[in-house]
Image (tube, rainbow, N blue to C red):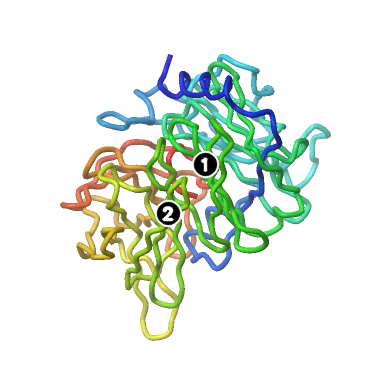
Amino acid sequence: MTRLHDALAEIADEAPAVDLADRAIRGNRQRKRTTMVLAAAATAVVASLAIMVGTGLLPLRGAGYIAALPREPRTWEIKSSPLPKKKVGPLAYAYTTSCPDTDVPPDCKPGRWRVVTRAGDTYDVPQALGLTDKAVLGPLTITPDGRALAYYSDREQKFKIRDLASGKELTAPVKVPRRQLESEIFLRVSDNGRHLAFTSFAGKNGLLIDMRNGRTTPLPTGWMPVSVADDGDPAVVVNWKDTSSRVRLVSPGGVIRESSIPEYGQRFSALAPDGRTMAKVGETREGDGPFEDDGTLVVFDTVTGGMQGKIKAQGLPEDAVILRLGHWLNDTEVAVLVGISDGRHIRDDMTTVYGMNVRTGEVRKTGIYPVGNARLPGIVM
């Protein structure tokens, strides 16, 4: 029994039988070339024909997870089955299905969510909203330990969190109509599955939801949740404009603390174990041109807004581009999602996760994945 499993079992007994909250989806608003690659592949090319078992995705405090790269990643050729009701092992990643351009098999359904376990089992998740007729991808996220899945149920119009081993599902106490998913939606969940946060760039405010007692706390429209704590600690939402970014900490009781940093950016890490440190992808620009990645991380204090400066990544391949950040592996290392660029595009057949030391810039490889647009445990999307 894991901590998450125990917590979800307890929560399930106490959770009110009310409606769920949802409103998810995302896209890429003006995300740069690198971020656009991640969301653009909504009808994803992907897959993994063979997966080698590693020591796990999280905690990544030593060894990591390696997935064998398929020679021809064609999702319609990969064997899968519906997600079982229970006894599913920790997930390695999730992706959306695609179909061939011609001679489409009658049973091929593009834009559906599919998950792959660390053991290599591949399951369809038909209950999770995938690509809509508005060309928007329904939200889905995996807890850092890979043991729980959060998604939007199109049939029930609710956000759900499922413990994969026990099959227990939790439902948020607020219903969100699907029509509210037609703008950019962000979904995050705490490591233990107790708190869920969602926001959008349009429409009503988002919510921070305590799945145990049904308590909800409003989150501001246009702010993106990047970190949701297990118990008591605040959720972190971010916003950016012009040449600066704002970071707001929202407690379950609604208490707000806000700081500002003189750095534009949309790609932040979760909150560090010390409860105040965060990082973001470093970006620069020439004149009035677009912001471009500069291969650094900006580390800052959410309490004071003070920055420790830009930390240059040491040891990444020359053609590597930092795409996203995620959870903290320990007090000094943050998860960094890296793609490979050919000078114009990011390869969509492989991404790598590194642990990057925010003091020295040194990196160590912790995971290799055979698809560029995958949802990975703990990575902020």
* Residue at the (60%, 16%) spot, across then down: 86
Inspect this view and state whether residue 356 appears: yes
Residue 353, image x and y in percent? 37, 42
- Label located before the other in sequence (1 or 2): 2
The residue type indicated by label 2 comes to: Val
Q: Nearer the viewer, residue 51 or 167?
A: 167
Eyeballing the image, is 96 above or below 220?
above
**Marking on residue 255:** 2
Eyeballing the image, is 31 above or below 249?
below
- In the rendered image, the quadrant that contains the N terminus is top left
Of all residues, the one furthest to the right in this rendering is 106
What element does badge 1 sit on? loop
* Residue at the (65%, 23%) spot, across then down: 83
Q: Nearer the viewer, residue 142 or 63?
A: 142
Q: Quadrant of residue 308?
A: bottom left
Q: Which dot, 1 or 2, sits closer to the camera?
A: 2
Residue at numbered disc 1: 375
Residue 370, image x and y in percent? 48, 38
